[in-house]
Amino acid sequence: MKLDILAIGVHPDDVELSCSGTLLKHIDLGYKVGIVDLTKGELGTRGSAEIRLQEVEAATKIMGVHTRENLGFADGFFTDDKEHQLELIKIIRKYQPSIVFTNSKFDRHPDHGRAAQLTYNACFLAGLSKIETTLAGEQQTAHRPKALYNYIQSLHTEPDFVVDISAHFEKKLEAIRAFKSQFHHAEANTNEAETFISNPQFMDFVKARAVHFGVPIGVQYAEGFTANRTLGVNNLMELV
């Protein structure tokens, strides 16, 4: 399956929190969208890897993405080395996305920046024909995405562009809340330790961030991204 957009997140729920509104919008526009989680989030304070996988299934169904995979890298301990690059190269060549989204370059969780660099390297290397990879016994062809964008996570980062997600914000929240073990809700297990994202105010932060990105372009809610290239415009009349 060739994808228009491939969203990569190091932990299950990274994509939902940071760019699911943009994915939902482009699915509605008729584009093919997929997600790859690099780890199972097994080091998360709350819940377990098994629970997270069940939550991933629920969130994926809510969003209606066309495909989703988990590469099973070691949460907290994966590295940006040849072994991990090759596994991600195989995925990029498998789906041949035009656009890739990935984690913030620098954030409060060190996995995020490491995943961003790994994705950057893999996207470039996937375009080199002399790097040979096979999948299901068949030789893969080289493919380099047209664009790689980093979504914005916990730490404030000035976006290079924002996407209006006003019509999709409620479904974004629904997808986030599918991760019941991670976020505050009325039936939460009070025996588990509170974390940065399980604090009751965290969902207020998610909404405030979306409002903050939306206000400059005159919309209710938006998601922000940073670019690894100079952005060009074909039609000035299409800018928001």
Image (cartoon, rainbow, N blue to C red):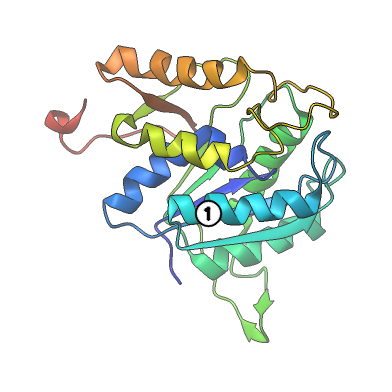
Do we see residue 228 in this rendering? no
Is 96 situated above or below 105? below
Query: Label 1 amino acid?
Result: Thr
Is 158 situated above or below 115? above
Which residue is rendered at x = 72% and y = 56% of the image?
85
Taking the image as shown, residue 60 lies to the left or right of residue 238, namely right
Quadrant of image for the C terminus: top left
Do we see residue 202 in this rendering? yes
Q: Nearer the viewer, residue 123 or 110?
A: 110
Residue topped by disc 1: 60
Seen from this angle, which residue lies furthest bottom?
Answer: 137
Quarter-wise, where is residue 157 in the image? top right
Q: Nearer the viewer, residue 42 or 161?
A: 42
What x and y, as percent, mark residue 166?
A: 31, 29
Q: Nearer the viewer, residue 230 or 136?
A: 136
Taking the image as shown, residue 39 lies to the left or right of residue 150, namely right
Q: Nearer the viewer, residue 60 or 30?
A: 60
What x and y, as percent, mark residue 236?
A: 15, 29
Seen from this angle, which residue lies furthest left?
Answer: 237
Which residue is rendered at x = 42% and y = 24% of the image?
160
Taking the image as shown, residue 223 lies to the left or right of residue 128, namely left
Quarter-wise, where is residue 213 in the image? top left
Q: What kind of element bears circle 1?
A: helix
